[in-house]
Image (cartoon, coloured by chain):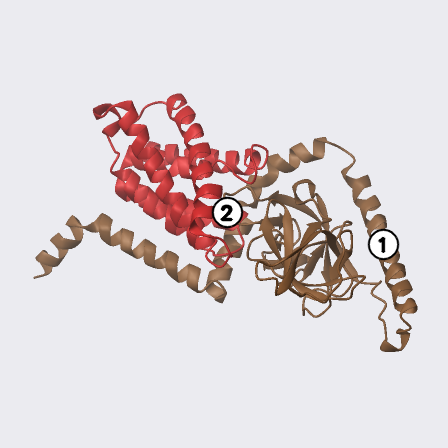
Chain colours: A red, B brown
Amino acid sequence: MLKKILHTIGLVFLALFLQVTLGDWISIQDIRPDFLLIAVILIARSDGKLYGEIWGFIIGLISNSIGVSMLFGLSALVKTITGFISGFLKGSKRSMSLFNYYFIVITIMLIHFIILYTIYYNSADMSLQYIVMRYVIPSTFYTSAFFIIIDNILPQNE
Amino acid sequence: MFKAIYDFIYDFFEYILLGVLILLSFIMILSGDAPQVEALQNSLSDTFSFLTYPKKLIQKTTGLVQENKELRRQNLQLIRRNSELIEAYNENKRYEEMLGFRDSIGYNVLPARVINYGSMSIGQAVLLNKGQKNGVTKHLPVISTEGVVGKVVNTGDHTAVVHVFNDINFRLSIRFVDSRVVGILQPIGEGLLQVRDIPTTAVIHPGEEVVTSGFSDIFPPNLKVGVVDEIKHSETRNYQIATVKPYVQLESLEEVFVILK
C-alpha cells in the first residue's frame, strides 16, 4: 500500500516537474501538453475511480496554485471528473484493442479540455466553435501524443 | 436502517465522493475572493514554489543575472524619464500645463524575478519571487523596463501571482498618446490586444503609442503599454477597433518591478 502511494506521489511530482520545466519550452502557439492530465489518467487507469478522483482533485489544486491565478478550483473540478471517468479504464488496456483504448483516452482528454476551456473562456468574446478549434482540439492531440509516448515508456502496472 | 444507510454509502462511495469533490471545486470557483480560499491558494503556492527551482537553475546558468538586474533597474529609470519628457513635451505643445501634469517619476519600485510563467494549459499568470514579506500586496501594478506587465492578484509570504495583460480576462484602461482618446484594452490572443468602441470621429493612426490612462485605481498614468498596429471599423461602422501590439514580450520576461504604494 505504502509503495503504491509513494509510486503515485513520485508520478505526480514527475508530472509537475515536467509541466513547470518543459511546459513553456514545448508550447506551440500557446498550446501546451498537460502532463498533469496524463498523470491523472495513468493513476486512475492503474488504481481505479476512487483514487483517480481523489488524485485528480489534489493535482488540480496544485496545478491551479502554481500556474493559474484566475478561477481557482477549475482545474480541480475538471481533473476530478477526468480521474473518475478514467477509472473505468482500470484493467482495460489488456482486455481491449490498442486502438479502442487510445480512442477512449483521447475522448476523455477531449471532454477534459472542453469543460476546462469553455468555463475558462466563458467571459471572453469567443464562439464555442473557435474555442474548440483553437484550444480544445490542439490541446487534446498535443497531450495525447505525449500520453502515448509516456504510456509506452512507463512500466505496465494495471 | 443504519445498516441500509451504511450499505448505500459503501456501495456508492465513489459516486458520493465525486459529488463532494465537484461541489468543493464549484465552491472554490464561485468564492475565489473568500479569505479561506485565498489562504489555501497562497499556502499551496508557497509550498509548491520549490518546483520552479530547476527552471531557475537553468536561468541562472545563462549568467549575468545580477548585472542584468542592475542594468534593468537603471534602464527602467531612464525609460521612465524619457517617457516623462515626451509626455511633458506633448503637454507643453497643448498649453495645458495648468492642468497639473504630475511628475510620475519616483515610484517606489521593488525588483522581482519571474520564477514561473504560463506553464499550465490555461491562465496567463506569472509567479514572482517576492511576496508579503517584501511588502507586496494584492492589486499592485507590475511593470518591466518595456512597459506594463500586469497586476498582483495573490500573495504568499515569499511569492506573488501576477495576472498578466495577455490573459483573456484582463482589462486595462488606456490612452492613445497623440489623439488623447481613452479606451479599455483587452487581449484577443496571438499576443495582440484590442481596444473597441472607439468613436469614429477619433483620429488614431498606426504607430501611435498607447499608455495607461490613470483612471484605474491600480495603474498610475503614462505607463507604456504598446503601439497601435491596425485600425479598422466595426462591421456596423458605428465605432473603430484598434489592434495594439504590446511592448512587453512575456515569453522572455525575467525581471519585473512591483510598484509599491
Residue at 69% x, 40% y is B252
Residue placed furthest toward the bottom: B98
Q: Can residue A122 be seen?
A: yes
Determine whether the residue tagged by mark 2 lies in a helix, strand or loop.
loop
Determine whether the residue tagged by mark 1 lies in a helix, strand or loop.
helix
Residue A158 pos. (x, y %): 28, 28
Residue at 54% x, 47% y is A67
Q: Which residue is mark 2?
A: B122
Residue A138 pos. (x, y %): 46, 37
Q: Nearer the viewer, mark 2 or mark 1?
A: 2
Residue type beneath disc 1: Gln
Q: Which residue is mark 1?
A: B77
Q: Quadrant of the N terminus of chain B?
A: bottom left
Q: Which chain is mark 1 on?
A: B
Q: Is B125 placed above or below B152 here?
A: above
Residue B20, quarter of the rendered image? bottom left
Residue count near mark 1 (Cα–Cα under 10 Å), binned few <14, some 14–19, many ≥20: some
Residue B198 pos. (x, y %): 66, 64
Residue at 70% x, 64% y is B219
A128 on left or right of B82 = left
Tell me whether circle 2 and circle 1 mark residues in contact (CB < 8 Å).
no
Q: Which chain is mark 2 on?
A: B
Residue count near mark 2 (Cα–Cα under 10 Å), binned few <14, some 14–19, many ≥20: many
Residue A53, quarter of the rendered image? top left
Mark closer to the chain start, 2 or 1 = 1
